[in-house]
Amino acid sequence: MAAKTRVKKELRVVSLWAVVIMVCSLISSMTTQVEALGRRGVVGGRTEIEGVKSNQEVQDLGKYCVDQYNVNINNVNNGHGDLMLRFSEVLEAERQVVSGIKYYLKISAVAVSTGLPHTFDAQVVVKPWLHSKHLLSFAPSSSSSSSPPSFHASLYYGLSQLASSNFVM
């Protein structure tokens, strides 16, 4: 009888050690994953794009955004080009993996009518496997002090007209 009791105690100790080892292994694994995420960013989160000014793909996306804005604003304003922009460069960019790659761009552009520089925030989704790009939004940058209020008001008017004209931007 004493032998059975001793075997049961030994089995409990072995089982307890097995649980302790499994928990330690799980914690170690989770710590490694969290450390890796800290270096790369959160899965599905935004990540900054380094070397934006020399990144031709990002600069091309910025030009695409300005070109799409010009096409759309031209359609709304019946060919009056007083809100047209000329692309200068992408100043900052982030990317996020969604159903494709969503780019968050800070774009510098010049108003064609005044020659004044302005900064805009744009969002564009690229689906390389479909060879498609879709401009989601384009608006004066909230951090920009270079855009005079009158330009902002007229730009917002143009964007609101785009939204109400069933034109997807």
Image (cartoon, rainbow, N blue to C red):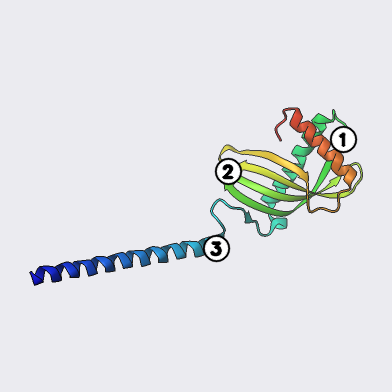
Residue at point 41% right, 66% down? 28
- Characterize the local packing of mark 2: few (<14), some (14-19) or many (20 or more) Cα atoms within 10 angstroms: some
Q: Amino acid at mark 3?
A: Gly
Question: Mark 3 and mark 1 in contact (Cβ < 8 Å)?
Answer: no
**Is 117 left, or right, of 94 in this rendering?**
right
Quarter of the image with the N terminus in it: bottom left
Single out the mark in the foreground, 1 or 3. 3
Residue at point 78% right, 49% down? 141
Outermost residue, right direction? 114
Find numbered disc 3 in the image and state the secondary structure of the residue it sits on: helix
Quarter of the image with the C terminus in it: top right
Place of residue 48 in the rendered image (x, y in percent of width and height, measured from the top left): 64, 57
Where residue 38 is drawn, which disc sits there?
Answer: 3
Where residue 100 is drawn, which disc sits there?
Answer: 2
Q: CA distance from mark 1 to mark 2?
A: 33 Å
Residue at point 69% right, 44% down? 123
- Characterize the local packing of mark 1: few (<14), some (14-19) or many (20 or more) Cα atoms within 10 angstroms: some
- Quick check: can you spot residue 84? no
Q: Amino acid at mark 2?
A: Gly
Pointer 1 residue: 81
Q: Which tag, 1 or 2, sits closer to the chain's start?
A: 1
Q: Which tag, 2 or 3, sits closer to the chain's start?
A: 3
- Identify the image quadrant of residue 98: top right
- Quick check: can you spot residue 53? yes
Q: Amino acid at mark 1?
A: Gly
Find numbered disc 1 in the image and state the secondary structure of the residue it sits on: loop
Q: CA distance from mark 1 to mark 3?
A: 47 Å
